[in-house]
Image (cartoon, coloured by chain):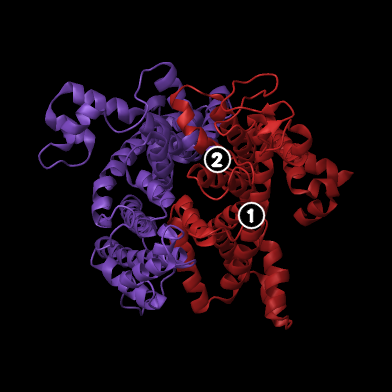
Amino acid sequence: MATLVARRRSWLDRVPVVHQLRQSVGLQRGMLIAGLAITGLFLLVALAAPALAPYGFADLRDEAGLFGSLQRPSSAHPLGTTVGGFDVLSRVLFGARTAVFVIAVAVVASLFLGVLLGVVSGYLGGWLDRVLVVVADAVYAFPSLLLAIAVSIAISGGQARLVGGVMAAAISITVVFIPQYFRVIRAETVRIKAEAYVESAKVLGTSTARIMFRHVLRNATRTLPLIFTLNASEAILTLAGLGFLGFGIEQTQAAEWGFDLNRSLSDVTSGIWWTSIFPGTAIVLVVLGLTLVGESLNDLADPRLRGRRAAAGAAPVEATEVTA
Amino acid sequence: MTTTLDPSAAQAPAATRRRPTGGGLGSYVLVRFLLIVPTVFILVTMVFFVMRATGDPITAALGGRLPADQLAERIHQAGYDRPLLVQYLEYLGQVFRGDFGRTLSDNRAVTTVLVEHGTATLELVVFAVLVAIVVGIPLGLVAGYFRDRGQDAALRVLAILFYATPVFFAGIVSKLVFSVWLRWLPVSGRASSRPQIELQTLKDPTGIYLVDAIRTGEPAVIGDVLTHLVQPALVLGLVTAGVFLRLVRTNIIGTLGTDYVTSGRSRGVGEMRLVRKHALRPALIPIVTVMGMQIAMMLGGAVLTETTFEWRGLGFMLAQYLSARDFVAVQGIVALLAVIVAVTNFLVDIVAALIDPRVRY
């Protein structure tokens, strides 16, 4: 019966987030919508940054001459200028671009590697599995920021930059997240391995690779959208942390909120607020948006946490669709 | 089954397996303790190879500032031109003996740096954990109790805000408001210069300023140390408070729905007592189990907090040595933090096993 209901759901309902949006009620729905709105705005800003920003992120002058250092917010510079003479508004807007790029590279790469390792390790087992689990556990227990620092040293090294700062940051964050995906997918794989349909596929003589990537992988990845949103917000925080410690991204290479905060640290003591408050608020907003989405998805996936009214409300929705 | 002599034999189904409690815990502690070794070993190895992946520490620290022949000589003297594997084995031997080498930038023994600045980080983290517990647990209790109502909504948003704000931004805002605009609290550091000298000249100092300040017995010094401690501890603690809030809320919702709470209520147990004794106690167990993870996260956060407030702990020094590209020092600090994380996780697992017998295996 349950499968029948699932099959009759419209295609729109099967898109991950849309389904949860329909399922949610009240406060939960409010949180999800707010999160989606902020995330959408963030993506939009990232996409349209060149059109929205009054200047380039590395511009120091326009036709009227140099911007000047630490100018208060004015009509020419709505959010003021930094100690280096950059326009704060432009850097905040372009910062969204850097963030999206880093999240995309880091999360996609770690997803790919973590899922691959998780399925292979969980399905094949043996000594490879044991070694990978011990290594992943050790890495997982370690403060992610410190790991990211170590990796970014390895990439950009003591010498001249081989890889661009943005890419180096993205790769460092990738390494941090691989164990997380690995653990989740491996646990799921071990569970699924014992299911009857895997057994029957084996009996039918399906190749190991096909079982791993058809039967197991597709069923093991259900929890991924959830981890994805939660990790995306963590990726932003790690990127900002790296930037704040002065890593990787030079101000002429790209605009990065964390690095701008690092530069503004000395302004704070003299009461200059505009160089730190705006990039900082941008980080908080984006992480807030992504976390709201992730948390709501998490709550909706966990029947213990789903709002009481939501649980009651979900049943009639499905029932009406069966009749439709 | 009746022929089995030992009822605790492994063939018995897991659910009904019985073990003498003392022996089970003892072997669990031993196994868990032995697991520290591979964890530390893996992390130290990883840090070593990751840091060396792009070259030797001397080129990193001084490359471009010295002529090539002098550079080569210094590399040779320090033994960095030998095969990496030889260096690695030597490094392992040194670490095993508790010798982390000497820093390149200011030629101090890394061990001295670790001891001197480790106490500062310890002080910060201990107070941050206190903040997290004092703020997070009661608020989580309130949120869980008033589930889906106004208080719950407000507290959940607050928890997410705590999590979404990077510690260094929280630190900057707090500094702007309380130190620069209101002038209530000092901007940075662990103590003002005069009390600091007094604390440093104290006979065998513990390095934990609050303890040392209390030992001097001067209210002015104690007050000074406390005002310096407030902001960093609050900023670092509130992040974790958000985590605790969410966790306690979820668990309270779970335990409030259990049969024993319902039966307690029907027996006329007071609501306060019901929440505090029946619902909260079991809800706190998961807090203990995530504590290890949280301490690891806090050490990462401490690096950022210390940099923001110029709190001269391990994190602050790490950032300093990083910008000086002094990788010998960085390696030592990271290795020490790895040991701390592994040991904390061990302790936390033991405490969890003591509280909840189901954890043991």
What residue is disc 1 on?
Answer: A107
- Numbered mark located on residue A258 in the image: 2
Q: Amino acid at mark 2?
A: Gly
Residue that protrudes farthest toward the top in the picture: B182
Label 2 CA crowd tier, 10 Å (few <14, some 14–19, many 20+): many
Identified at 90% across, 44% down, the residue is: A324
**Residue A33, percent from left and from top:** 71, 33
**Which chain did the image draw in purple?**
B
Q: Amino acid at mark 1?
A: Val
Label 1 CA crowd tier, 10 Å (few <14, some 14–19, many 20+): many
**Which chain did the image draw in red?**
A
**Residue A187, percent from left and from top:** 56, 63
- In the rendered structure, the residue with mark 1 lies on which chain? A
Foreground pick, A148 / A2: A148
- Numbered mark located on residue B356 in the image: none
Foreground pick, A228 / B134: A228
Task: State which quarter of the image contains the C terminus of chain B.
Answer: bottom left
Of the numbered discs 1 and 2, the one sitting upstream in the chain is 1
